[in-house]
Image (tube, helix red, strand yellow):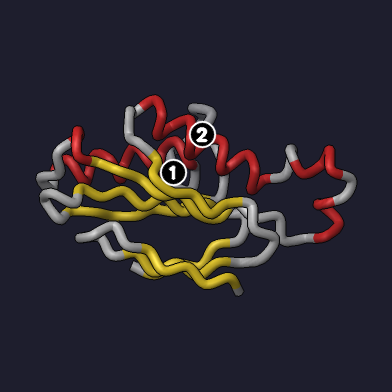
Amino acid sequence: MVFILGSCVGVCIWDEVNAIGGATHFLLPSWDGTGVASPRYGNVAISILLQKLLEAGASRGQLRAKVFGGGCLFSSMREPAAHKEQHLGSRNVEMALETLAKAQIPVVSTVVGVDRGQRIVFRTDTGDAEIKVL
């Protein structure tokens, strides 16, 4: 799987024992329950990915995750430092980590908050990820 990230967050989850994996990426942190539950929201996207992996035969106890993206690409948003905690990328990363923790999926690697885009190539069978900063 290949995806490009900026403030979006990419979550890669795999079961190496059963060689099953998948990835999702999302633009917004959390669906508030109004309207349609869209995978553009982190909590919805990760839940759908977990459901699909388990349906495909992944073992919940073997699942591991990697999280990428959540950058702050605009210099005007990086200063002063207080704004950095509030930008969309940071909120997306926080949602991804919280959702994975609630699902009891260990996060084994993160490359987040980079001030440039990222190109991620993820191998769903092994969990290997190749990262290129753009």
User: What crowding class fits label 1: few (fewer than 14 Cα within 10 Å), some (14-19), or many (20 or more)?
Assistant: some
Q: Residue at x 14, y 38 (%)?
A: 59
Residue 105 is situated, as x and y percent measured from the top left of the image, at: 33, 34
Give the x, y percent position of residue 75: 82, 60
Residue 3 lies left or right of residue 81; in this view the side is left
* Quarter containing the N terminus: bottom left
* Secondary element at image label 1: loop
Q: Position of residue 49 (x, y in %)?
A: 30, 45
Outermost residue toward the front in this view: 108
Disc 2 marks which residue? 31
- Return the residue found at the far right: 80
Position of 14 with respect to 34 (left or right) is left
- The quarter of the image holding the C terminus is bottom right
How many numbered discs sit on the rendered protein?
A: 2
- The amino acid at mark 2 is Trp
What residue is at 46 percent from the left and 54 percent from the top?
10
Above or below: residue 50 compared with residue 11: above
For the residue pair 103 and 62, the one nearer the viewer reads as 62
> At numbered mark 2, what does the secondary structure look like: helix, strand or loop?
loop
Numbered tag placed on residue 18 in the rendering: none
Amino acid at the residue labelled 1: Ser
Q: Quadrant of residue 81?
A: top right
Q: Residue at 49% across / 49% down in the picture?
A: 110
Mark 1 or mark 2: whose residue is earlier in sequence: 2
Labels 1 and 2 touching (C-beta < 8 A): yes
Q: CA distance from mark 1 to mark 2?
A: 8 Å
Q: Is residue 65 left or right of residue 87?
A: left
Residue on which the image places disc 1: 38
Query: Is residue 8 found left or right of 19 in the rendered image?
Result: right
Circle 2 Cα neighbour tier, 10 Å, few/some/many (<14 / 14–19 / ≥20):
some
